[in-house]
Image (spheres, rainbow, N blue to C red):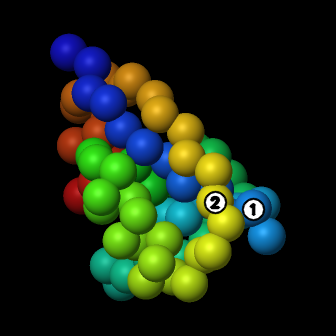
């Protein structure tokens, strides 16, 4: 089953928002490490929390098991 996710990229530093090991949010240059947000609202709130003023969001459809594994 495919799940819709949103990936955010900061247009200033060209890096992706990603979960950090301590449960916070960080930036990564690697798409494979990017965070997967389940809603536009969740993505927008995280971008605001990280003071990202300009960003691009990508909508992707990914296998649900990959999403669950990535969010743990």
From the top left corner, tell me how far across and down residue 54 is, in percent: 67, 66
Q: Is mark 2 on a helix, strand or loop?
A: strand
From the top left corner, tell me how far across and down residue 61 is, in percent: 39, 24
Residue 6 falls in which quadrant of the image? top left
Q: On the picture, is 1 further left or further right than 13?
A: left
Q: Work out whether 33 lies above or below 59.
A: below
Which label is found at residue 55? 2
Residue beneath the point at 54% across and 76% down: 26
From the top left corner, tell me how far across and down residue 36 is, in percent: 39, 49
Q: On the picture, is 27 further left or further right than 36?
A: right
User: In the image as oriented, which residue stretches furthest toward the right?
Assistant: 13
From the top left corner, tell me how far across and down residue 1 is, in percent: 20, 15
Q: Distance of mark 1 from mark 2, alpha carbons?
A: 5 Å
Residue where numbered disc 1 is placed: 11
Residue 52 falls in which quadrant of the image? bottom right
Residue beneath the point at 75% across and 62% down: 11
**Considering the image in quadrants, where does the C terminus appear?**
bottom left
């Amino acid at each position: 089953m495919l799940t819709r996710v949103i990936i955010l990229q900061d247009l200033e530093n060209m890096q992706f928002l990603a979960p950090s090991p301590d449960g916070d949010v960080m930036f990564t240059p690697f798409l494979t490490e990017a965070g997967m947000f389940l809603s536009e609202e969740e993505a927008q709130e995280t971008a605001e929390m990280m003071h990202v003023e300009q960003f691009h969001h990508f909508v992707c459809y990914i296998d649900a098991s990959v999403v669950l594994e990535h969010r743990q």
